[in-house]
């Protein structure tokens, strides 16, 4: 049976989705991730229509310049370690979109941003794990875009701005990461870490729901936020949100998911 999508007018939104921990939704004990799984499973129904393709920015790929996957049939990269054997047999056979990859490079070039394409690179788990829940049919072409290794927030906002016109072409832009990503503290029950996650998450939500000009200015200086470096000792899982905010244009963000997992507060956002 063909999925019935909710109908909305306008261009595709921009999403920031939490991708969970490793292959978390496909393991014993996944109950703690059940609310995140339910949130992800509702994503497709929330869209105005089925996207022609998805451009996804994951916190699990960095390169010297923003780089796009250009294979028509991307493989999977099982870039997690020490998990049950069956999690290395997960499949997500979504096609690639070589023409979209070309368009991404063209738009970045027009904005004065150097870029590259990679015909060998597959999808990392920051893509296929949440997409197995959000888009389980794997029937929408997907292109993945890397972060740039310098992790400059202003630069990544500009990357998003350069790509924003894709939304009007029925391209869904999805950023995946985590609003809290201190692995040393994540699995502990340290109340200081729990409080840090609340402080940073509250600040981030206030910023995302602000006007675009103030939002982007404050995101550029995210390190000044309460408990910023306690929550992100290294910011690769936060930087996809910068691309999403840049691509959102004047659209304000909406805080549409919040949960506490292992004592840490995690959020998801939608623009448009």
Image (cartoon, helix red, strand yellow):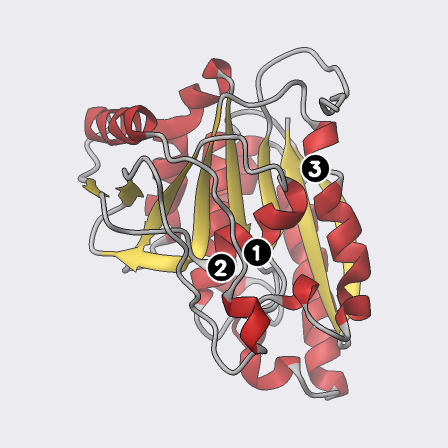
Which residue is at a point 65% across and 37% down the rendered structure image? Answer: 270
Q: Which SS class for mark 3?
A: loop
Q: For mark 1, what is the residue?
A: 129
Distance from Cα at disc 2 to Cα at disc 3: 18 Å
**Residues at circles 1 and 2 in contact by the CB criterion of under 8 Å:** yes
Tally of numbered tags: 3
Horizontal side, residue 21 vs residue 96: left or right = right
Q: For mark 2, what is the residue?
A: 125
- 2 or 3: tag closer to the N-terminus: 3
Distance from Cα at disc 1 to Cα at disc 3: 14 Å
Q: For mark 3, what is the residue?
A: 43
Q: Position of residue 12 (x, y in %)?
A: 58, 22
Q: Are there few (<14), some (14-19), or many (20+) residues within 10 Å of tag 3?
A: some
Q: Nearer the viewer, mark 1 or mark 3?
A: 1
Residue 4 in view = yes
* Quadrant containing the C terminus in the rendered view: top right
When the figure is inspected, residue 183 is found, relative to residue 77, above or below; the finding is below
Distance from Cα at disc 1 to Cα at disc 2: 5 Å
Q: Are there few (<14), some (14-19), or many (20+) residues within 10 Å of tag 1?
A: many
Q: Position of residue 39 (x, y in %)?
A: 76, 47
In this rendered view, identify the residue nearer to me: 37 or 249. Answer: 37
Kindly identify which numbered label has been placed on residue 222.
none
Horizontal side, residue 95 vs residue 271: left or right = left
Residue placed furthest toward the top: 9
When the figure is inspected, residue 111 is found, relative to residue 35, above or below; the finding is above
């Amino acid at each position: 049976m063909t999925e019935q999508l909710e109908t909305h007018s306008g261009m595709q939104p921009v999403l920031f989705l939490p991708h969970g921990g490793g292959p978390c939704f496909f393991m014993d004990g996944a109950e703690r991730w059940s609310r995140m799984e339910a949130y992800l499973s509702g994503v497709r129904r929330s869209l105005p229509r089925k996207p022609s393709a998805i451009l996804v920015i994951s916190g699990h790929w960095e390169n010297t310049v923003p780089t796009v996957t250009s294979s028509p049939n991307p493989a999977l990269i099982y870039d997690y370690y020490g998990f049950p054997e069956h999690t290395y047999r997960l499949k997500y056979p979504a096609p690639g979109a070589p023409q979209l990859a070309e368009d991404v490079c063209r738009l970045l070039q027009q904005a004065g941003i150097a870029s590259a394409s990679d015909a060998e690179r597959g999808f990392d788990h920051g893509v296929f794990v949440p997409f197995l829940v959000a888009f389980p049919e794997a029937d929408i072409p997907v292109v993945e875009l890397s972060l740039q290794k310098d992790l400059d927030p202003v630069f990544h906002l500009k990357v998003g701005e350069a790509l924003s016109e894709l939304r009007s072409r029925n391209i869904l832009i999805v950023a995946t990461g985590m609003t809290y990503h201190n692995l040393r503290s994540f699995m502990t029950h340290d109340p200081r870490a729990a409080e840090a996650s609340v402080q940073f998450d509250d600040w981030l939500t206030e910023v995302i729901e602000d006007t675009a000009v103030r939002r982007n200015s404050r995101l550029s200086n995210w390190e000044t936020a309460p408990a910023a470096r306690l929550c992100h000792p290294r910011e690769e899982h936060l930087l996809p949100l910068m691309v999403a905010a840049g691509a959102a244009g004047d659209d304000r963000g909406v805080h549409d998911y919040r949960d506490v997992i292992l004592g840490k507060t995690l959020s998801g956002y939608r623009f448009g």
